[in-house]
């Protein structure tokens, strides 16, 4: 499903180069749930950004179902982000002045799906993420956990094959983190490939995790 | 398509406080620009209407740098020049209106001359010349009427000629509003009555006007006029038109220069506002890109949003300018064009539909506005979403 070959990402800061990712090679099978552990600055988020095609690597390749997404132009990269991946971030990134329903819809605005069908999809996904009771509430009235569930619903609205979660529980309390894990368990049953970058110990005890990757200093240290 | 439109209007509504400030500033900008062009256009058309009835040549005796009254005997000499179809002495001068310490222009015309009567009928509605000549009557400009009304001279006014006698002259009518740029401070009366009120001797006239039938002969006739009298100033019709146009073009030019400076400052601010796009705005663009929106989808969203604001501002600005100029008679801007002197404040502007002006305003505003918004949005759209979100 996902094959990463010789991936490097170098950032330049005032003529100084430093590696954000160094020689990353990785294989993730379909329907696997993979967790990537590491300290801040270890390269987890950069790796997810490249898999999500919202960042280009310096060199290397990322194959998704046999296609190198690194070579995609804006049209294909956007299509890939729209149809193949769903992204969940710790900072939620929601339109604060719109309500939950409108935020979830955002990903579908540019598709050819009819308004009625969009509304049905929003209702269904909101139920799955346990946010349906807040659909018409403005974002700025929601709690952190509700915002996170709204982000999850938005990421899932296009029924993506891959779900990328970057520190999904970093801004959540214990109770809301457990709710997130409940949703994750439901999603695991839907055949999605899920990658979670985290340093939350809560994920270490999860038995639904198929693979654990540990990163340090831009490199993959160990696989489990 | 419907989903996109809904989303555009949803964003416009949700972020209305952000858009409202741009809408108000844009409306004001458009209104000032439009009002300036409306006033300038109205003045231009007024001048064309009024000056088209001017004589081909105006001749004045000019000695020691001063304009003096011209001998009446010169008229016959000029009539003998081949090509001159008509020569006539005019009586006019300034009358000091004591109550308000201002001056009116008194013009005496020969009301028995059919040509003059025809011209007068163009400038005054329902002018019945027989009725006009039945008693001492005058036709007055809009500005003069306002001043007379202020001191309750509703029906007549009593002039005091230099010999300190009294001349009671009735107000017959006022000039058409669309000639007010020239006729505003003007009083027209019978020539002999004007002669008496202004104290012009019987064998003199203020100046002489000449008509030439074949306009191709104007240069030849001018040459003959030059050699006929050494102490004579010759003013051509085109000189008068150029003189007036230069005055207004100069004033509108200065105003436009100032306006354009402010307008480009506004665009610069707008550009900077979007260049230094707030963190929230930038993140929203990055978010859309992250959700699979292409660069062109984001640009088309922002373009549509801003074009709606720009077009609404355009129409609201045009309507505001229309009301300001044609209903309220352009206070402040009018004074920039016409000055504060004498009676100019009472000029009223007439509407002459000119779609070129509307298109010009549209292009002057919409193109820079759109570019000022879209260039910064494009710059953010092509940046990697992860970089913007970091």
Image: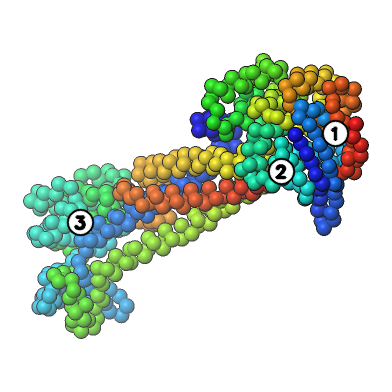
- Give me the residue at 78% from left, 50% from top: A59
Q: Quadrant of the N terminus of chain A?
A: top right
Chain under numbered label 1: A
Residue tagged 2: A68
Task: Please provide percent x and percent y for residue B117.
Answer: 12, 57
Left or right: residue A92 compared with residue B295: right
Task: Please provide percent x and percent y for residue A148.
Answer: 74, 25
In front here: A202 or B279?
A: A202
Left or right: residue B135 compared with residue B36: left
Residue B50, image quadrant: bottom left
Chain under numbered label 2: A
* Residue B303 visible (yes or no): yes
Task: Please provide percent x and percent y for residue B216.
Answer: 18, 74
Residue tagged 1: A36
Q: How many marks?
A: 3
Task: Please provide percent x and percent y for residue B234.
Answer: 24, 75
Q: Gap in Å between the C-alphas at discs 2 and 3?
A: 90 Å
Q: Earlier in the sequence, mark 1 or mark 2?
A: 1
Please tell me if label 1 and label 2 are on a single chain: yes
- Extreme-front residue of the structure: A66
Q: Gap in Å between the C-alphas at discs 3 and 1?
A: 97 Å
Label 1 CA crowd tier, 10 Å (few <14, some 14–19, many 20+): many
* Residue B134 visible (yes or no): no
Front tag of 3 and 1: 1
Q: Gap in Å between the C-alphas at discs 1 and 2?
A: 22 Å
Left or right: residue A214 compared with residue B6: right
Residue tagged 3: B188
- Give me the residue at 70% from left, 18% from top: A128
Please tell me if label 3 and label 1 are on a single chain: no
Is there CB contact under 8 Å for labels 1 and 2?
Answer: no
**Of helix, strand and loop, which one carries label 1?**
strand
């Amino acid at each position: 499903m996902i094959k990463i070959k010789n991936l490097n990402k170098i950032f330049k800061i005032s003529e100084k180069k430093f590696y954000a990712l160094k020689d990353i090679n990785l294989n993730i099978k379909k329907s696997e749930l993979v967790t990537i552990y590491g300290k801040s600055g270890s390269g987890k988020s950069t790796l997810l950004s490249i898999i999500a095609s919202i960042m280009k690597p310096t060199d290397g390749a990322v194959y998704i179902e046999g296609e190198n997404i690194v070579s995609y132009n804006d049209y294909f990269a956007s299509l890939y982000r729209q149809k193949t991946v769903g992204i969940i971030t710790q900072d939620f990134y929601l339109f604060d002045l719109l309500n939950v329903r409108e935020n979830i819809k955002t990903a579908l605005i540019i598709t050819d799906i009819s308004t009625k069908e969009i509304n049905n999809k929003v209702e269904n996904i909101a139920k799955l993420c346990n946010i349906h009771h807040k659909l018409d509430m403005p974002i700025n009235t929601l709690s952190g956990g509700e915002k996170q569930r709204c982000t999850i619903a938005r990421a899932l609205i296009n029924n993506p094959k891959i779900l990328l979660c970057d520190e999904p529980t970093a801004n959540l309390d214990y109770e809301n983190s457990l709710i997130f894990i409940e949703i994750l368990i439901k999603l695991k049953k839907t055949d999605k490939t899920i990658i979670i970058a985290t340093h939350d110990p809560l994920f270490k005890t999860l038995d639904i995790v198929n693979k654990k990757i540990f990163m340090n200093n831009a490199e993959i240290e160990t696989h489990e | 398509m419907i989903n996109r439109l809904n989303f555009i209007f949803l964003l416009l509504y949700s972020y209305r406080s952000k858009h409202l400030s741009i809408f108000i500033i844009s409306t004001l900008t458009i209104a000032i620009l439009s009002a300036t062009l409306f006033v300038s256009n109205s003045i231009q058309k007024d001048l064309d209407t009024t000056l088209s009835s001017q004589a081909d040549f105006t001749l004045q005796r000019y000695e020691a740098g001063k304009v003096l009254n011209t001998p009446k005997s010169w008229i016959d000499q000029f009539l003998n020049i081949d090509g001159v179809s008509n020569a006539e002495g005019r009586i006019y001068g300034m009358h000091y209106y004591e109550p308000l310490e201002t001056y009116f222009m008194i013009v005496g015309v020969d009301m028995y001359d059919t040509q003059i009567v025809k011209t007068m009928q163009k400038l005054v509605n329902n002018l019945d010349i027989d009725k006009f000549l039945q008693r001492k009557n005058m036709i007055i400009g809009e500005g003069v009427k306002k001043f007379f009304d202020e001191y309750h001279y509703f029906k007549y006014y009593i002039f005091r000629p230099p010999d300190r006698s009294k001349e009671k002259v009735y107000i017959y009518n006022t000039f058409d509003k669309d000639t007010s740029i020239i006729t505003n401070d003007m009083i027209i009366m019978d020539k002999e009555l004007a002669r008496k009120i202004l104290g012009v001797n019987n064998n003199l006239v203020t100046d002489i006007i000449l008509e030439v039938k074949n306009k191709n002969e104007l240069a030849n006739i001018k040459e003959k006029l030059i050699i006929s009298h050494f102490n004579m100033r010759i003013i051509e019709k085109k000189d008068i038109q150029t003189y007036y146009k230069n005055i207004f073009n100069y004033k509108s030019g200065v105003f436009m220069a100032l306006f354009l400076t402010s307008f480009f400052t506004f665009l610069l601010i707008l550009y900077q506002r979007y260049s230094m796009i707030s963190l929230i705005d930038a993140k929203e663009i990055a978010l859309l890109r992250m959700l699979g929106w292409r660069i062109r989808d984001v640009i088309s969203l922002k373009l549509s949003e801003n074009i709606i604001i720009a077009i609404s501002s355009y129409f609201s600005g045009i309507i505001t300018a229309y009301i300001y100029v044609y209903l309220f008679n352009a206070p402040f801007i009018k004074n920039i064009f016409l000055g504060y002197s004498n009676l100019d404040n009472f000029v009223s502007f007439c509407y002459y539909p000119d779609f070129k002006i509307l298109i010009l305003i549209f292009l002057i505003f919409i193109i820079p506005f759109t570019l000022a918004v879209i260039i910064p949005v494009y710059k953010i759209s092509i940046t990697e979403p992860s970089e913007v979100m970091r």
